Amino acid sequence: MSVILTSVLILGGIGVAGAAVLYVVANRFNVEEDPRIDEIEALLPGANCGGCGRSGCRDFAVACVKAASLDSLACPASGNGVMKRIAEITGLAAVAGKPRVAVLKCNGTCSMRTRVAAYDGPPSCAIESFLGSGEGACPVGCLGCGDCVKACPYEALHLDSDTGLPVVDDEKCTGCGVCVKSCPRRLMELRMKGPRGMRVWVACSNHEKGAVARKDCKAACIGCGKCVRTCSHDAITLTGNLAYIDCEKCRLCGKCVAVCPTGAIHSSFKVPTPTTEN
C-alpha cells in the first residue's frame, strides 16, 4: 500500500506542479484581444469563403480592427449594410462597394457543342481538364462536372440537366469568387450585378479563329466585330478573335445582343427585337 500511496502522491505532485507552471506561463504570455473582433465576426456570414482575400471571417475581423482604413477591405458575402456597421464599430469611414455576381463565359450546351470524346472518370472538372480536353471539341469549353457547384458555399449554383452547364442563382450569389477559383478553365467571372440585376456579357472564352471556333461550338464568338461596330459607348473590345464587354462602360442598350450572329452575347434581361424600317 505504501508503494501505491507514494506513486499517487508523486503523480499528484507532478500534476499540481505542471498546472502551476501552465498557469504562470498562460498569465505571462496572455495576449488581450480587442473585443471588437468578436463583435465584427458575429456580423459576418461565417462561410470562410475567402472572397475578402483573407483566410477566414475571423482573420477579416482582425484586419478590420487593425486597419487604418477600410478602403481595401470588403466582405462580398455581407454587402454594404454590414460594412457600414463594421465602419461604425471601428470608427472608420465605410466604402460602398458595387454588388457583383458570377457569370459563365461559355454557352457550349449539349446541343451546341461538338462531342469528340467520352469521359468515364471521376466527376471532376479539375481531373478531366488535367487528363485531356474533355468531351467537347472546344479546348476551353465548360466540362460540366460541377466543380463550381460543389465549391459554392451559398448553394448559388446548380447544373442544368438539359444544357449540362452550371446556372447561377442571382439571389443567392454573393460574388465571393469561390467558383472563379474552382474552375480549371477560368470560365466563371465576377461582374457588376448591374441596376435591377441587368447586365450583358460574352458567354464564350474561345480565342480561335471564327471558322474553327464555330466548328467547335455553334454558339462560339467568331470575332466578326459586329458588336464592336454597333456599340456606341466603346464598351466592347475584340482581342484574339474574342469580344469582351467592359461592364463599367456598358449602358445596357442590348444592341450587341441583337446583332451577334451566333448568340454568344448574353443578357440577364429581355432585349427588344430590332425593327426594320421600310
Image: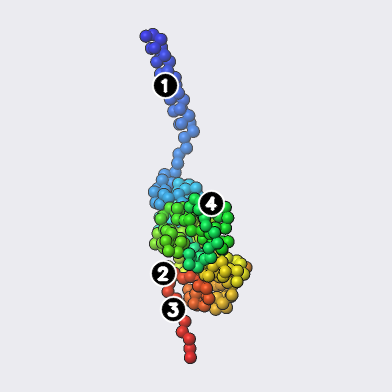
Q: Which residue is at 44% across, 28% downward?
A: 23
Type of residue at label 4?
A: Ile
What separation in Å lies between label 1 and label 2 (alpha carbons)? Answer: 66 Å
Instruction: Please tell me which of labels 2 and 4 falls first in the chain.
Output: 4
* Picture disc at residue 34: none
Q: Which residue is mark 1?
A: 16
Mark 2 or mark 3: which is in front? 3
Q: Which residue is mark 4?
A: 127
Q: Which residue is at 55% across, 75% downward?
A: 227
What separation in Å lies between label 4 and label 1 (alpha carbons)? Answer: 55 Å
Q: Which residue is at 48% across, 73% downward?
A: 252
In the figure, 11 relative to 158: above or below? above
What separation in Å lies between label 2 and label 3 (alpha carbons)? Answer: 17 Å
Bin the neighbour count of mark 2 within 10 Å (Cα to Cα): few under 14, some 14-19, many 20 and up.
few
In the figure, 209 relative to 58: above or below? below
Left or right of residue 14, residue 204 in this image: right
Type of residue at label 1?
A: Val
Q: Are marks 4 and 1 in contact (CB under 8 Å)?
A: no
Q: Which residue is mark 2?
A: 196
Frontmost residue, 60 versus 273: 273
Type of residue at label 2?
A: Arg
Instruction: Please tell me which of labels 1 and 3 falls first in the chain.
Output: 1
Total tally of numbered discs in the picture: 4
Helix, strand or loop at label 1? It is helix
Instruction: List the single residue furthest toward the top.
Output: 2
Instruction: Please tell me which of labels 1 and 2 falls first in the chain.
Output: 1
Q: Which residue is mark 3?
A: 272
